[in-house]
Every structure is written in C-alpha cells, then in structure tokens.
Image: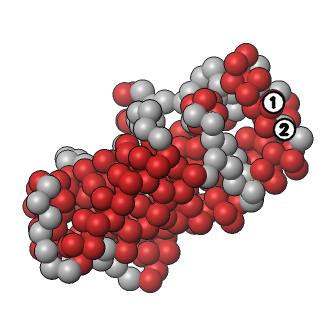
C-alpha cells in the first residue's frame, strides 16, 4: 500500500459501515476525477483549468440547490444533501488541483503545508463529517494526519514528481542541505543518492513523522470503526517512513511499498496504540 494519490481514502473498506460506502465513493469519484483532470494525460494547462472549472460549476449548482445532470455530480449532490456536508473542503481540493497545474516549486515549508491544507486535509474533514465527529480538536488532529500523509506521498514519489517537472521538497531545505535542483535530476537518472540527499531526506522524514504523531491521538479518541480505520492509516504512513529509512533514503531506485506481510505488523501496532 503506497501512500499514493487517494489510496489512503478508505473507499469501501471492510471497516466502514455499509451505509457510508456510497457516500465515500461519491466523494472519492469527485476528488479522483478532478485530480486526474489536473494531472493526467497530455492536456494543456488551459484545458486542465477549464476542466476544473466544470467541477467548480457543479459545486456552485449544488450550493444553489440544483442537481447537475452529469451522473457523478448528481450522486455527489445527493450525498451532500443527505449528510449535510460542507462544500468548502471540496472547493479547497479544486484550489489545490488548480495550483498543481501552475505551480511546480515551493519556496518554503509553510507554503507546502498550505498546499497540503487544501490537497489532503479536506478528505479528513469530509470523513469526520460523515461520521458526525466534526469539532475543533478532531479537525486539528485530522489535518495533521492528512498533511503528514501528503508529505509522505511526496517523499516516496520524489523521482516520479521530478519526471513530471515538479519538486515538492521546499527549496529552502534544498539550499540548507546543499542539494541542487540539477542534482535531483541527476539522481533520478542515475539512482545515485548522495550524502547530502540522505541528510535532507532524514530531516524531511522526521518532520513528517512528528506531524503524523501529533495527530495520532485522534485515532484513539474516535470510537468504533472510524477509529480502527484511522489507526491503520496512521500506521501505514509511519511504516512507509520506516521503509524510506531502511532504503537509506534512496527513493530513486527503491520506491517504498508495503507488502502483504506488513499489514500484520500494522494491525499489531494499531492494536497497541
């Protein structure tokens, strides 16, 4: 289980109450579809932004009480009304996807976290809303978990993102550790991680771990299935970080993944949380 795309979105999980599965699937379809508009294929930036504008228009229609004709948006409209879901998290997702079209570098960590706030945190917000568990403390911890998952996704996919022309590592961190942008491209081609790169990634891994652990109490606080779902998500993210460390931060030749046997370890750790 790589922490990739929306794979940490618990669609149709065996731990999820069946009554919520259609709602989660509708939200997932919207998020995944919009993400693909922004990131997949060979469309021009203008075409991608135009496609995302259609998603924004659908949210406007739902906000006005209408039901869009397109089936995916119609399903979402029904879910929004049934569970009285806020639309702002969905608008935040679209904001992040638009940013992906036009932004390929992040000067510092706060700017990257702002992107995570819109690209990842809305998923947790919507899940809490489905379970009727939205409050200030839960949102704070959920945001920490979701942003940490997004960072972990970036760290395991450095090579893939470079190939797409993107660098999510904060430029101030690259400068601090003496890793040039050209060096990143060279390491992607050769797979030869440098000592400076390993020091940089050790720093980023520890920062993502600290963020994840800061939000982890939410998994123990939430009752029932959502709590167990979240425990496994937290443990999956932490295990990916361990795999990055075990590879000596060489994500160019060894993109970390979790094998089936590691789910037993994650399950055991979830029980012990």
The percent coordinates of residue 53 (x first, y second) are 36, 60
Task: Tell me where residue 67 sits by quadrant.
Answer: bottom left
Between 166 and 144, the one lying in front of the other is 166
Q: Residue at x 14, y 64 (%)?
A: 68
Q: How many marks?
A: 2
142 lies above or below 112? below
**Dot label at residue 183:** 1
- Does residue 190 appear left or right of residue 44 in this picture? right
In this rendering, position of residue 59 left or right of residue 153:
left
**Residue 56 placement (x, y as % from top left):** 33, 65
Q: Name above or below for residue 208 compared with residue 266.
A: below
Going 70% across and 19% down the picture, which residue do you hit? 189
Q: Is residue 248 visible?
A: no
Color encoding of the figure: secondary structure
View extreme (top): residue: 190
Asked where in the image residue 135 lies, by quadrant, the reply is: bottom left
Tell whether label 2 touches label 1 (CB within 8 Å): yes
Give the residue pinned by disc 2.
179
**Residue positioned 88% across, 50% down in the render:** 176
Task: Give residue 151's mark.
Answer: none
Q: Establish if 176 lies above or below 224.
A: above
How many other residues sit within 10 Å of disc 2, few (<14), some (14-19) or many (≥20)? some
Residue in the image at 71% along x and 60% along y: 109
Q: Nearer the viewer, residue 202 or 24?
A: 24
């Amino acid at each position: 289980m790589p922490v990739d795309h929306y794979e940490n979105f618990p669609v149709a999980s065996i731990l999820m109450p069946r009554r919520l599965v259609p709602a989660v699937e509708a939200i997932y379809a919207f998020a995944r579809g919009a993400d693909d508009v922004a990131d997949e294929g060979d469309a021009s930036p203008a075409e991608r932004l135009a496609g995302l504008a259609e998603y924004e228009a659908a949210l406007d229609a739902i906000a006005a009480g209408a039901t869009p004709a397109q089936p995916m948006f119609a399903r979402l409209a029904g879910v929004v009304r049934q569970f009285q879901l806020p639309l702002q998290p969905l608008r935040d997702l679209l904001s992040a996807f638009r940013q992906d079209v036009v932004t390929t570098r992040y000067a510092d960590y706060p700017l990257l976290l702002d992107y995570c706030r819109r690209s990842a945190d809305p998923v947790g917000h919507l899940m809490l809303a489905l379970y009727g568990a939205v409050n200030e403390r839960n949102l704070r911890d959920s945001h920490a978990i979701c942003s940490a998952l997004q960072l972990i996704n970036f760290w395991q996919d450095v090579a893939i993102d470079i190939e797409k022309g993107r660098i999510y590592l904060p430029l101030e961190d690259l400068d601090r550790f003496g890793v040039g942008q050209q060096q990143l491209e060279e390491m992607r081609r050769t797979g030869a991680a440098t000592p400076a790169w390993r020091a940089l990634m050790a720093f980023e891994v520890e920062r993502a771990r600290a963020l994840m652990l800061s939000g982890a109490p939410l998994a123990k606080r939430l009752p029932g299935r959502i709590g167990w779902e979240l425990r496994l998500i937290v443990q999956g993210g932490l295990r990916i970080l361990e795999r990055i460390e075990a590879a000596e931060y060489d994500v160019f030749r060894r993109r970390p993944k979790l094998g089936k046997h590691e789910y037993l370890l994650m399950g055991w750790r979830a029980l012990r949380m």
